[in-house]
Image (cartoon, rainbow, N blue to C red):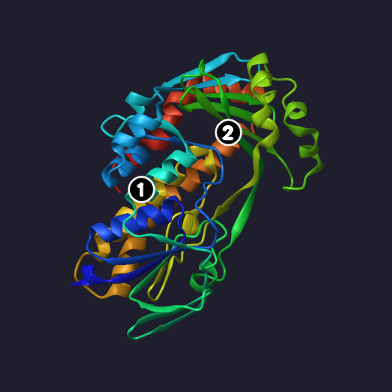
Amino acid sequence: MSSHLEVLVVGAGIAGLATATALHREGMSVDVIERSPESRAMGAGLFLPGNSVRALTALGLGKHLSVQGAPVPGQRLMDHRGRVLADIDMAELWRGTAGCVGITRGDLHAALQDIAPVPVRHEVTVVSLKQSDDGVHVEFSDGGSGRYDVVVGADGIRSGLRESVDPAAGTRYLGQVCWRFLTDAPDIDRWTVWLGPGTAFLAYPVGGGQVCCYADVAAASPEDPTTAAGLLGLYSGYGQRVRDLLASPAAREAYFSPVEEVSGETWVRGRVVLVGDAAHASSPNMAQGVAMAVEDAQVLAEVLATRGDTEHLLQQYVQRRLSRTRWVQRQTHRRDRSRSMPPAVRNLAFRYGAKALWERGYAPLRDLP
């Protein structure tokens, strides 16, 4: 039976912990290593659409999401001055799936740690990896070694394992940089975005009266001098509510990163397989990062729990996941193109067509993976 596999999961972020949990539930033995020295969740908050909440609930986190997170009943699109362009009802958009939730990344990561079946070995990386007929032989940076039936690369957009699976794949800069921070704003009770020329500012509740704020700006490169103006300078033409949020002390410590994607199509080499951002990171504008990672975990566990040749089963996993993750990336590209239209044209398009655009973009994701 394939379910008695010995599996190494590299990476203890959301993708890695979800994968370890899903595999363990199917009877597999799992080890987890993590390169960082301690448990930490980079970033600020997460908006979890219906398919993400459904996947996390299946892992056993439904109660945690309802207690720690905040329900997000709708999405509101506005121009940079605060004039409403469209309101999208989340219950209607995600009908038959689950309600949407906002939560801090730290709270979600802690919940996954609580249900993870094995302890994480921190400050450990893979030094060498050799495949043979009897599995994958791994040498670790702490001097240890092990033999595994499968090695899972869940080590994020900067994956160290991706090079051994698909040397041609890498990150691609998408022409935007972003900032994220948490601050108090109990009056914001839904996903709310202000759209300006070449910029956007988003805020949504994450529980406890806090919101996650996300700001992005078009930039030729992550070092573009445009960004030196700082957040308040870049958003000085926005309405007062945005300027107030940006004036909070938390904004000065905002987490900064380029917006990038990974679009390789080779996720498996022998018995080494990639999941989550290591395989298919995409722009956050569809809020599908968590959903795709946890769905990967579920499908991988389901496939490996069946009888058959392990390498063939890993190829089945890719076949099941590739079209869905490609769809998400195509939709993120469409959103970027629509946002980059002249503001007057974009605002008109969203005022009259946002609901139809959202329905087309998310409808396939209501189906089970």
Amino acid at the residue labelled 2: Ser
Could you tell me residue 202's position as x and y percent? Answer: 57, 28
Please tell me whether mark 2 sits on a helix, a strand or a loop.
helix
Kindly give the residue lying farthest to the bottom in the view shown. 133
| Residue lying at 54% horizontally and 37% vertically, measured from the top left | 335
Q: Which residue is label 1 attached to?
A: 114
Could you tell me residue 145's position as x and y percent? Answer: 44, 79
Could you tell me residue 75's position as x and y percent? Answer: 46, 24
Find the distance from the CA under tag 1 to the CA under tag 2.
40 Å
Could you tell me residue 69's position as x and y percent? Answer: 40, 31
Q: Which residue is label 2 attached to?
A: 338
Q: Nearer the viewer, residue 295 or 88?
A: 295
Amino acid at the residue labelled 1: Asp
Q: Is residue 365 above or below residue 4?
A: above
Which mark is in front, 1 or 2? 1
Residue 323 falls left or right of residue 279:
left
| Residue lying at 44% horizontally and 45% vertically, measured from the top left | 109
| Residue lying at 52% horizontally and 74% vertically, measured from the top left | 142
Q: Earlier in the sequence, mark 1 or mark 2?
A: 1
Q: Nearer the viewer, residue 84 or 128?
A: 128
**Mark 1, residues whose alpha carbon is within 10 Å: few (<14), some, or many (≥20)?**
few
